[in-house]
Image (tube, rainbow, N blue to C red):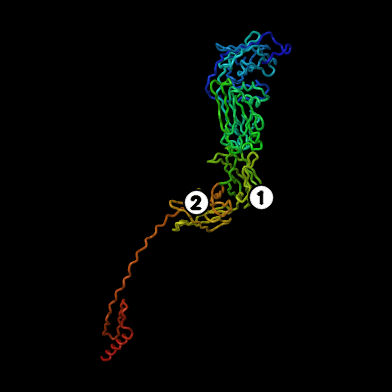
Amino acid sequence: MSSLPPSGSARWTPLVVLLLLVAAVGPAVAGVAPASTPGQSSAPTAETSQLETPSQGQPHVNSPLEDARDEAVTEHRGDVVTLTLSVGNATNATVEVVGSAGAQYEATVSVADRDGDGRVTLRWNTFRAGHGGAYAAPGDDGASVVAETTIDGRVGTGGYDVTVTADGEQTDDVTVDLTRPPSPLVRARVPLPGRTVGLATVDGIRSGVRTGLLPRSERVGVGGSVVIELQAPGIAGALAAQPGANASERLAKLLTREGFHLSIREDPSTVTPEKPPVRFGLVGAGARVLPDPVEDTYYLVYDLDETPRRADREHYPSVLPDDLFDVNLTVGPASGLVAERRTGALTELQVLERSVDLDERTYPLVNPAADQTLGAATNLPAGSRVTVVVDGPGSFTARRNATVTDGEGDNRVAATFDLSTVPRGSELDVRYVVDGDVLATTDWRDEDEEHVGVVGTDPEVTVRRVEHTGDTAAPLSVALEASVVDESFVVLHAGAVTGPVLGASGQLAAGTYETVAVNATKSVAGVERIVAVVHRDVDRDGAFEDDPPVVLDGTSVADVAAVPATPTPSPTPTPSPTASPAASPTTSPTTSPSETAPSPSTASPAATGTPGFGVVGALLALAGVLAVLRSL
């Protein structure tokens, strides 16, 4: 309870300031009401007094009442009501409060306008009403409780008509309406990686929420920061009444009182004897509390890389990937703010290893030209900022800030560079950096890693011929031309670049090949087209095993060809028996009466192989003819 200044320290009139608060004291009505919507009021600038932090109201702080008479101030029961009261030209004033019928609470408060501005700011802690210490005047003004009714429990909800008189004249009138507070809400907010968010002040947090840089999220990266947002109307008065040098200490005290409880516990599913649970406290390393009671909101900020574990395991890492936490705030009947049942809020928080994935389609070939894009998959949330750094031969280096975008499955990060000055055939080292941490780099050299190549001649592949072989073990033969710039394979896919693999060539060294023969070693039944795709032998083992396709300007190096129809075999003809030719008849020689000797008829030899006259027979026949001619 504040006391009046000693005689002579300020000019007081004999007029006593009377504050009469009349309200029915009754049990609070149990139930859950919708949460209030936070406004945009400014955050308190200093913790000067346990009662100097206003709470949410409609309006939060009423304007000078000589300009806003009969205005109503709405506040949750249990919060702190801030009234700016007009006292005119008087230094002292009397405040008369008349409540509803049956009221059992009264108080008389003397106030003094010590700075002479005609107004007095009076703060009424409705949580302390009837228990002493409910009234205070910040700054140069003064307030002292002359009399107050002692009550059990908390002051009731309802309307309070407050009138102020000074020098016998009424100078102000306002109605205070105390309402039942709704159930609390708990949210987790995580700053977007790579973005700057002020987590040291309420204004910084408000700005991050407003700009979308501090979104609601239930996933936080290892070593990052998380903001637990508690919306708890009705606890501002209890918080202000706690002992402590700052808000963190007072909130820690409050949450140890009967009726209030906040727990941030690791889920049992991620706790083992070798991995003890994380200890989240409200004070100490890695934790701070930023109250915003104007909005009935309290921010608990944790830096996970500083949060310790159990006292007997201080050497153990603070928070590990896949850790899962339950955040639970409850307010029970013992608090005096709710009636027969507890109300609460629960949210989860999962810890992840932030990553940029360089395993698939992330080692594209780039040209020594402008507008060359390097990208990767990532589990960072959309809107995160990643710095992509490229180092090349000599003194070449370039960096770009890239924003993570939503993708199908994993999110994506990509940056565009001017590589026109990089010599042909060079190799580049690429790093992906977030908040000073390198999440991935092609410079982690080992036999399974590679660098991004800068090429002078684009890799390409052209299908020249597709033929069926008739061999069930290798039903299709493909002849093609190819140019590759690194150890590679030409792989046959069914239907699309990502279609099933039908076959692959042997490893091809860098160079141009006029003829590459690749056989499909899988069935091609139902396949209408094949896609020949160049794949990089990333592990240099000489065998194709899910090696990634070569990507140039965002497109796989490939060619498409139709599969010809399967040829229909011609039927084999049945051989016919060979017939023996018939023998030609023998023609008898015919004599001609002409003087000229006739040509002899020639008898055809039998096809059966029977011999004819022969030479001797022909001569004897000719001699006989001549003998006949001489006898004539």
Q: Which mark is residue 501?
A: 2
Count the numbered circles shown.
Answer: 2
Residue 71: x and y in percent read 58, 16
Residue 217 visible in the current orientation:
no
| Disc 1 element | loop
* Quadrant (top left/top right/bottom left/bottom right) for the C terminus: bottom left
How far across and down, in percent of the image, does residue 484 sit?
57, 54
Q: Position of residue 180 (x, y in %)?
A: 55, 20
Figure quadrant of residue 203: top right
Q: Residue furthest right?
A: 8
Labelled pair 1, 2 in contact (Cβ < 8 Å): no
Q: What residue is disc 1 on?
A: 393
Q: Secondary structure at mark 2?
A: strand
Q: Residue 433, can we see it?
A: yes
In the rendered image, the vertical position of residue 346 relative to residue 28, given as above or below: below
| 236 w.r.t. 427: above or below | above
Q: Residue at x 56, y 36 (%)?
A: 269
Q: Is residue 245 left or right of residue 69?
A: right
Which of the 4 image quarters holds residue 116? top right
Looking at numbered disc 1 in the image, what kind of residue is underneath it? Pro
Mark 2 residue type: Val
Measured in 3D between alpha carbons, the distance from the residue under mark 1 to the one under mark 2, in whole angstroms, is 37 Å
Circle 1 Cα neighbour tier, 10 Å, few/some/many (<14 / 14–19 / ≥20): few
Q: Nearer the viewer, residue 565 or 335?
A: 335
Q: Position of residue 402 (x, y in %)?
A: 61, 40
Q: Earlier in the sequence, mark 1 or mark 2?
A: 1
Q: Is residue 391 above or below residue 147?
A: below
